[in-house]
Image: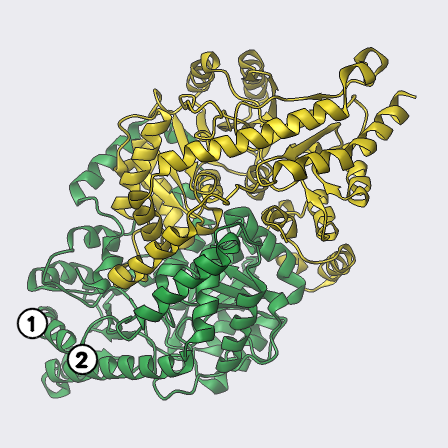
Chain colours: A green, B yellow
Amino acid sequence: MTSQDIELQRDELTAETQTALERAEASHRHEALFSERAHNIKQSAVRDVFDISVRPGLVSLAGGSPSLAKLPLGLVAETASRVITEHGMEALHYGTGKGTPELRALICEIMAEEGILGASPEDVVVTTGSQSAQDIAAKVFCNPGDVVLVEDPTYVGALNTFEAYQVRVEPVRMDEDGLVPDELEARIEALEAEGKSIKLLYTIPSFNNPSGITMAAGRRQRIVDICREHNILVLEDNPYGMLRFDGHPLTPLRADNPDDVIYCGSFSKIFSPGVRLGWALVPKHLYRRFYLAAEAVVLCPSTLNQLIVTEFFRAFDWRGYLAESRAVYAERCKAMLAALGEAFPREAFPAEEGKGIEWTTPEGGFFVWVTLPAGIDTYPLLHEAIDAGVVFIPGAAFTPSDTANSHLRLAFSGVEPERIREGVRRLAPVIRAAVEAHAG
Amino acid sequence: MTSQDIELQRDELTAETQTALERAEASHRHEALFSERAHNIKQSAVRDVFDISVRPGLVSLAGGSPSLAKLPLGLVAETASRVITEHGMEALHYGTGKGTPELRALICEIMAEEGILGASPEDVVVTTGSQSAQDIAAKVFCNPGDVVLVEDPTYVGALNTFEAYQVRVEPVRMDEDGLVPDELEARIEALEAEGKSIKLLYTIPSFNNPSGITMAAGRRQRIVDICREHNILVLEDNPYGMLRFDGHPLTPLRADNPDDVIYCGSFSKIFSPGVRLGWALVPKHLYRRFYLAAEAVVLCPSTLNQLIVTEFFRAFDWRGYLAESRAVYAERCKAMLAALGEAFPREAFPAEEGKGIEWTTPEGGFFVWVTLPAGIDTYPLLHEAIDAGVVFIPGAAFTPSDTANSHLRLAFSGVEPERIREGVRRLAPVIRAAVEAHAG
């Protein structure tokens, strides 16, 4: 099994067991005990398909897994061993709810590399992956019915997290330069007129998951200003920020707005998802409640992993490694774009005949977002794609409503270029047939 | 700094900074954005004292830290190194939301050792410490205002977790055999008559934290039956179950009640808190929602730590290690009981003169619970104890109301016998003076 299939395996149940379980759940005597929010925590239709989609030989363009191929495993192993031998009594014990001071200092160095200068380790909370930082933000700020604004489309994991707090998630349109400021403002005003309480704007400004779109540098301050004016906090999720292909990270929204932005970072894409370490850089006046909420969930992040990551980054040329990683992802992205260009030449798919197929050209990150002619539902296409030996994620997964749409997410991050080409070759006839049928 | 001080360091802020921060929070423009539940996530008065109580030379009888002194660090280091070298591509990647099948199988073996026979790995969710399992249970079952029944006293971390969900926590009295069934029943009926919705009974049946009291074997089924009759789920937290001094774990409530009990276990006390791995064994009909909620918080528990723990337990005589650990804790407990007996001989503290001092005699676990004459508030005594060079946790921390009471928790688990004796020697005059003043 390849690494990129792992995300597909979240649920190993077969679809049949699943249905049986759902029946059992519906009729048991504890049904009445579930909280209201529990009904919002659901397995999406997309994940159901994942369950039956793990097959040997399948090319997975679904999971957004980082490439770990160039990680020096020997050095990681040696670091882990040394941490346990020399600092075992600290590494294997409880730590503080905020994370170790050494890791928080390292995190500030990493953020400086991205353009957040002068952040204090005192304002950092180490979390169990950055997903957990989003969970804490929702917990600390959102009552049921409160609004969280998100990009359309946005990260499926964040949607799951917000929906678990019974939040009303409102997607705002992006164009090729990211979130559209005027639309954001208009939406906020409309929601305010409705009497809604808007708490957060959740944004992935650089190489948005799933679309690969980047919020233009010139637009970033305007977005924060709009939120500030309406007293809305910005929750900036930036796991891919350092993976800009040209090597120059775009300045995060947080950089010049320390009081208005909660910034979420992660070691998952720049080192390893398996250590489950991320962080939040929190405005000083919000810090105490944020870290106490973090502590109430997990007591503390894994001390062992915090020490391993700290020591490893101290011993390792991580800047050089990131440069290598960027080259890997750039090459894979290029392979995917070329394969798409070959599979769907513009002249063969004329937009004026309702056959236009478009895709984004990411400047970094892990994903390409493909748009088929409006009216085609990509969800049933997934079943056909699986039969053809390739898997992707239908666009519906990345919207709060989960309603059918004509987009699909293709991840290039965890797949070798040759397999990417093979995957697109397998996918092409499925898409071609759908487009022809739709136009005809 | 000794390991047992680490729990004290949760918040490194001084009390003054704390107050300044609280003022800043109260006046900032984002104050209105906090969720209702955020106001329930508070730093307890007890933790405030912790902040100023970390001093070199202090004997800490406060933190409930395991003793790791007998852990073979070399073998742990070697295992970690091998896992990364040989299985790095799996260990450093994302895993499934349920945990690895291998670790779930190991967990079933461990539970069998405690008396839970035939549990299926399919019903286990690996969590980021067992605190996280409690968080998920609250999330899945509790609406604001719902009732969770707990033992009086109960684990401060669970109280923090439940209160973050705006749950009404109702403590039920224990006697020397644990939760009193008749009182439990009466309380349930009174709450039902009030129209309250009771969702969970949270219990630490073996060597309760903080009291060290054990729910008698003959009482266990009755407790579950009462809950079943009233359609209340039992949330059984059993981190110390295997640490019964005589080596024979009491059969958990879960054993014969697979449909009515969510069982929480942890590697923190039997191996290492630093890996942050615990688990929940969940009734089949509740499993799906439980693990989806877990996934929404952290995506997956740390794969690296799961592989390390699995491989380490496979290579290690963990049953032998537990036997050694039990002997360590039994010796420390004995040292504490002897020191208390010496410091407070019954004849010098006659109950009939309002001077009676009592303490529990635990059969296992980490804690002794001391009861001073009613009317003495142990909270101000903590300040005096710190001045005398010893720290404990006042009983108020272990009640939902946080109101003054005459109990104190003494942890013997992480302290060498000689230091335990020294700690009690330092504590004795403080308590003696308080008792004399109160009686006089």
Q: Which residue is mark 1?
A: A429
Residue B91 tag number:
none
Task: Give coordinates of residue A338: x percent, y percent.
Answer: 17, 85
- What residue do we see at 18% from left, 80% from top? A356
- Tag 2: residue type? Gly
Task: Give coordinates of residue B351: x percent, y percent.
Answer: 79, 13
Identity of the residue furthest to the right in this view: B440
Q: Nearer the viewer, residue A22 or B152?
A: B152
- Tag 1: residue type? Pro
The label nearer to you, 2 versus 1, is: 1
Determine whether, in the image, residue B100 is placed left or right of residue A275.
left
Are the residues flagged by discs 2 and 1 from a single subunit?
A: yes
- What residue do we see at 39% from left, 80% from top? A214
Chain letter of disc 1? Answer: A
Q: Nearer the viewer, residue A191 or B295?
A: B295
- What residue do we see at 65% from left, 48% from top? B8
User: Which class describes the residues within 10 Å of circle 1: few (<14), some (14-19), or many (20+)?
Assistant: some
Q: For the residues marked 2 and 1, what is the alpha-carbon distance in whole angstroms?
A: 15 Å
Q: Nearer the viewer, residue A223 or B279?
A: B279
Q: Which residue is mark 2?
A: A356
Task: Give coordinates of residue A112: x percent, y percent.
Answer: 53, 80
Of mark 2 and mark 1, the one earlier in the sequence is 2
